[in-house]
Image (cartoon, rainbow, N blue to C red):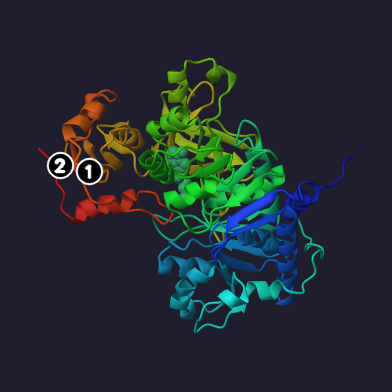
């Protein structure tokens, strides 16, 4: 018989501190300067925080809301909270006030931990948060903000706490973190990650065919820790013994580039960030001196971005798909031998897919009757998932979020090919259904964005008396440009059948976005309806 090793989050940071103690963890602090730390110190601070929280009365299972940028301190908080047996509820500062109030009350957060510059968000809503007992500001005494609220200072709390008290013990299925879905319709839904699901997910994500990280990497998560479990990087990086760079709150391309140039070999963010970065590199005639791989997910990555990273900057793109409900990794596009055998152009086409899942994730495409569809590279269906880190039931949800066979409906529409590579064609709510056929809004958008005058594009369905729905393409022109619609249409004509082409293309100054930076098609459709938009005859 083997030992029963408990898959608790604390074991990850214990491992990093013991076997990779001096590996650097560098970050832009909220106070301003760059701080240089390492896994031993991050663990020490997590231990002190865990003791301090217990001293403040935190009990096993208590929920603590955290609203913070990607800093070294945030990593200590990431481990200190579950180390005290409590649950780390990540809070996105870009959420609307009503949504924040809803999720904080729904998750029953007892404490809030917050970066100093984000405190005003809580000052504005605190009277609607009756369950919050304490607010801890993530800074030192000298930088504590003036506030009408009663505050605790993080660094003061840690002073004098023991460096190595044991973590609070518990079952590996205990809750470790909570993240709410973006909630484009109805209220956001809480996804509760267990210690076990987080550890298994991090192991699966770090594998060579997935993000492929090791102790030789220096990893910078641009994706905020509050977005979809921080893409698990705060678990997988210390598990691999990797060094980290935490970019802080400066999310400008210039600010991020400066941090990437601190020896970063691997980074991760949504496509919008990289569109801005590529523009920054081009205009400043800059290169990356250490970056080797970039993980791009959260929304479909345009072919042009993949091509530019790889051909112009020698940085390999890993196109990924996932969601909050999957902790979040679903698939990553790495090359199996079958793909390595292809020509460079065909490999690039494969990279427009989101690749294949790791061990612990199982996928199917199904029709509306729940029947599995063929993996033939043509048939589209509802993408279903199950696995070790896939949601079973939402927080306080009535009933399971999965069907009787354990399949969770991702809400995405996809095609799977014979090699098991997944192509996401749409959200099921956004797919354009014209004359009984489905038109992929994502593919229209990605093709339009290849035009240099197009900064952003959204294809949406507009009701049509004969066809049910017809596509309309809404674009945001690149700075100072007025792209020719005929040219964009010609680009689309090269790739799409006539009936799939948009009935109209028009420009807007900006598109509506969700709190996680995705285009809100729901809002866009609503805007068109409110404006009484009519298709051209
Ligand atoms: P979230 O839970 O906010 O991370 O959103 C998850 C959703 O983002 C997925 O269900 C997809 O609709 C979308 N998504 C994530 N990655 C991709 C991708 N690579 N391509 C297309 N859509 C994606």
**What is the x, y in percent for residue 373?**
47, 27
**Residue plotted at (51% across, 81% down):** 146
Question: How far apart in space, not on screen, are marks 2 and 1 (Cα)?
Answer: 8 Å
Q: Look at mark 2 in the image and give the residue it sits on.
A: 535
Residue drawn 54% across the image and 65% down it: 30
Query: Could you tell me if residue 152 is visible in this image?
Result: yes
Q: Are marks 2 and 1 in contact (CB under 8 Å)?
A: yes
For disc 1, the neighbor class at 10 Å (few under 14, some 14 to 19, many from 20) is many
Disc 2 crowd, CA 10 A, few/some/many (<14, 14-19, 20+): few
The answer to whether residue 111 is above or below residue 170 is: below
Which element carries disc 1, helix, strand or loop? Answer: strand
Q: Nearer the viewer, residue 527 or 406?
A: 527
Closer to us: 372 or 6? 6
Residue 11 relative to residue 478: left or right: right
Q: Where's the C terminus, which quadrant?
A: top left
Horizontal relation, residue 39 to residue 473: left or right: right
The count of marks equals 2
Work out which quarter of the rendered image holds the N terminus and state it.
Answer: top right
- The mark found on residue 462 in the picture is 1
Q: Residue at x 51, y 33 (%)?
A: 315
Residue 350, image x, y percentages: 46, 25
Note whether 187 is above or below 352 in the view shown.
below
Residue 391 placed where, x, y %? Answer: 58, 49
């Amino acid at each position: 018989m083997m030992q029963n090793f408990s898959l608790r989050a604390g074991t990850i940071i214990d491992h990093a501190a013991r076997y990779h103690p001096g590996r650097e963890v560098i970050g832009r602090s909220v106070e301003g300067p760059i701080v240089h730390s390492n896994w031993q110190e991050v663990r020490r601070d997590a231990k002190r925080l865990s003791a301090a929280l217990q001293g403040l009365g935190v009990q096993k299972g208590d929920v603590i809301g955290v609203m913070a940028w990607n800093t070294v301190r945030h990593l200590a908080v990431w481990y200190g909270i579950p180390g005290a047996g409590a649950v780390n509820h990540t809070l996105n500062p870009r959420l609307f006030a009503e949504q924040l109030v809803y999720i904080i009350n729904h998750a029953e957060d007892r404490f809030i931990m917050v970066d100093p510059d984000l405190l005003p968000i809580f000052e504005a809503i605190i009277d609607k948060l009756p369950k919050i007992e304490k607010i801890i500001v993530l800074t030192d005494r000298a930088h504590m903000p003036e506030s009408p609220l009663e505050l605790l200072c993080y660094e003061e709390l840690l002073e004098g706490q023991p460096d190595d008290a044991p973590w609070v013990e518990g079952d590996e299925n205990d809750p470790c973190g909570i993240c709410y879905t973006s909630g484009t319709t109805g209220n956001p839904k809480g996804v509760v990650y267990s210690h076990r699901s987080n550890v298994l997910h991090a192991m699966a994500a770090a594998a060579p065919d997935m993000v492929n990280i090791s102790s030789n990497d220096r990893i910078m998560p641009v994706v905020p820790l509050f977005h979809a479990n921080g893409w698990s990087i705060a678990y997988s990086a210390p598990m691999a013994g990797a060094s980290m760079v935490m970019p802080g709150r400066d999310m400008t391309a210039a600010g991020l580039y400066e941090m990437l140039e601190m020896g970063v070999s691997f980074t991760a963010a949504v496509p919008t960030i990289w569109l801005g970065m590529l523009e920054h590199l081009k205009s400043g005639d800059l290169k990356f001196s250490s970056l080797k791989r970039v993980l791009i997910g959260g929304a479909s990555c345009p072919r042009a971005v993949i091509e530019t990273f790889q051909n112009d900057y020698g940085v390999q793109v890993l196109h990924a798909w996932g969601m909050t409900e999957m902790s979040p990794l679903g698939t990553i596009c790495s090359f199996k031998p079958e793909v390595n055998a292809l020509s460079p152009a065909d490999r690039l086409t494969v990279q427009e897919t989101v690749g294949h899942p790791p061990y612990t994730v199982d996928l199917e495409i199904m029709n509306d009757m729940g029947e599995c569809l063929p993996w033939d590279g043509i048939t589209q269906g509802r993408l279903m998932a199950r696995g070790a880190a896939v949601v079973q039931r939402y927080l306080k949800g009535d009933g399971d979020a999965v069907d009787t066979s354990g399949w969770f409906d991702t809400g995405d529409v996809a095609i799977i090919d014979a090699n098991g590579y997944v192509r996401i064609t749409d959200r099921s709510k956004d797919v354009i259904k014209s004359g009984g056929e489905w038109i992929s809004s994502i593919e229209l958008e990605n093709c339009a964005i290849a035009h240099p005058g197009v900064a952003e594009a959204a294809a949406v369905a507009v009701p049509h008396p004969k066809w049910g729905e017809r596509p309309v393409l809404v674009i945001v022109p690149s700075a100072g440009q007025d792209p020719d619609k005929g040219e964009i249409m010609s680009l689309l004509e090269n790739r799409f059948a006539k009936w799939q082409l948009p009935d109209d293309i028009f420009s807007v100054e900006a598109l509506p976005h969700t709190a996680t930076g995705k285009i809100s098609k729901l809002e866009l459709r609503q805007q068109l309806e409110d404006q009484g938009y009519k298709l051209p005859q």
